[in-house]
Image (cartoon, rainbow, N blue to C red):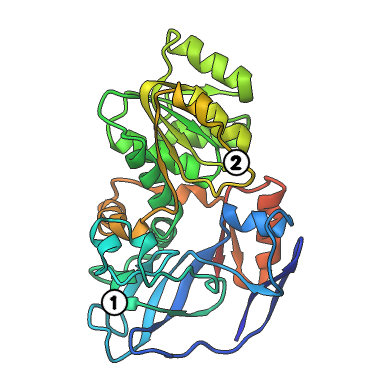
Amino acid sequence: MRGTVLYGPRDIRFEAREMPRIEQPTDAVIRITATCVCGSDLWPYRGLQPIKGPQPMGHEYCGVVEEIGSAVKSVKPGQFVIGSFATSDNTCPNCLYGYQSSCVQREFMSRAQAPILRVPLAEGTLVPTPGMPSDDLVPSLLATSDVLGTGWFAADAANVKPGSTVVVVGDGAVGLLGVLSAKQMGAERIIAMSRHEKRQKLAREFGATDIVIERGDEGVTRIMDMTNGVGADSVLECVGTQESMMQAIQSTRRGGYVSYVGVPHGVEFKGEKLFYTHVHLHGGPAPVRRYLPKLIDLVLNHTINPGKVFDLTLPLEQVAEGYRAMDERRAIKALLRP
């Protein structure tokens, strides 16, 4: 089998790797139907996040179960399944509180950009669909594995309510699906911050009512002007930089909510400054498993079409081009087919 391996900055290779197999009774092995490149993959790809030697890549996946361990009862060979980027037993206290991405047995997936994948803790990680989905639904089902689940968590953690005013900082796939999620939760006004025409158009398709092109302090000033000096009820931070986080906090009304789902790089807070903002902060690795059943139903019922974020589809063996296209912002998100 061949799979994707990152060797260093902008050095992605599709090369021979060991065939995955059942290692623990709680494992499942699935044949990948579709996988993709994540915006978070670009941090190590660009050399902004260190890796320890060659790193197998990929954490978003859906496919058909080929084999299960003896302890796995919830999925069977032949079923189409979707799983999270974080494994979970779905029984520990953290899981029962709805934070499966902090499961006490958690592993972060990192080998999904390949034709075959071993999924640990399959019983609590994988969710089967009622039947074999049609091929046109595969991109949207794949989106539930991470970017939609993360965008949904962003809206949920930011306490988006019917009638609220929402700002989304970040126009990558997560930010765009944060817009979609806020719309589904009933937000009345959704302001997407984007300078990219193609992404602005998709944001409006997903439910954005306004577009703001300014960033940083200028972006904050623009949001304040648009909200009569009050700020937004809910702000979704979907990037992970110091500038984006400060922009999010400063765009929020007193007593409002900020969610942060962008993997942070160099983000620091000054306690006194944060103290006087009176904002609620909540975020972290999205507990995608909590939302998967609902999100899968929304896709299968054709209520939402999150697969629109995939604007480039490539054979898996051309994965390096997928990384290049996203790095150069020629693509929002690259879908990979084995």
Q: Secondary structure at mark 2?
A: loop
- In front here: 298 or 248? 248
Badge 2 crowding class, 10 Å Cα cut-off, few under 14, some 14 to 19, many 20 or more, is few
- Residue beneath label 2, please? 267
Tell me the residue at 52%/72% (across/down): 112
Confirm whether residue 46 shows in the render. Answer: yes
Residue 65: x and y in percent read 36, 81
Residue 230: x and y in percent read 41, 12
Quadrant containing the C terminus is bottom right
Residue 279, quarter of the rendered image: top left
Direction from residue 271 to residue 196 in the image, left or right? right
Q: Nearer the viewer, mark 1 or mark 2?
A: 2
Confirm whether residue 214 shows in the render. Answer: no
* Above or below for 86 versus 234: below
- Indicate the amino acid at tag 2: Val
Residue 139: x and y in percent read 44, 58
Tell me the residue at 35%/69% (across/down): 88
The circle on residue 123 is: 1
Residue 30, quarter of the rendered image: bottom left
- Indicate the amino acid at tag 1: Glu
* Above or below for 8 versus 20: above
* Above or below for 337 versus 257: below
Quadrant containing the N terminus is bottom right
Residue 278: x and y in percent read 39, 24
- In front here: 252 or 140? 252
Mark positioned earlier in the residue sequence (1 or 2): 1
Whole-angstrom CA distance, mark 1 to mark 2, is: 35 Å
Tell me the residue at 61%/36% (across/down): 242
Direction from residue 93 to residue 146 in the image, left or right? right
Badge 1 crowding class, 10 Å Cα cut-off, few under 14, some 14 to 19, many 20 or more, is many
Is there CB contact under 8 Å for labels 1 and 2?
Answer: no
Count of marks placed on residues:
2
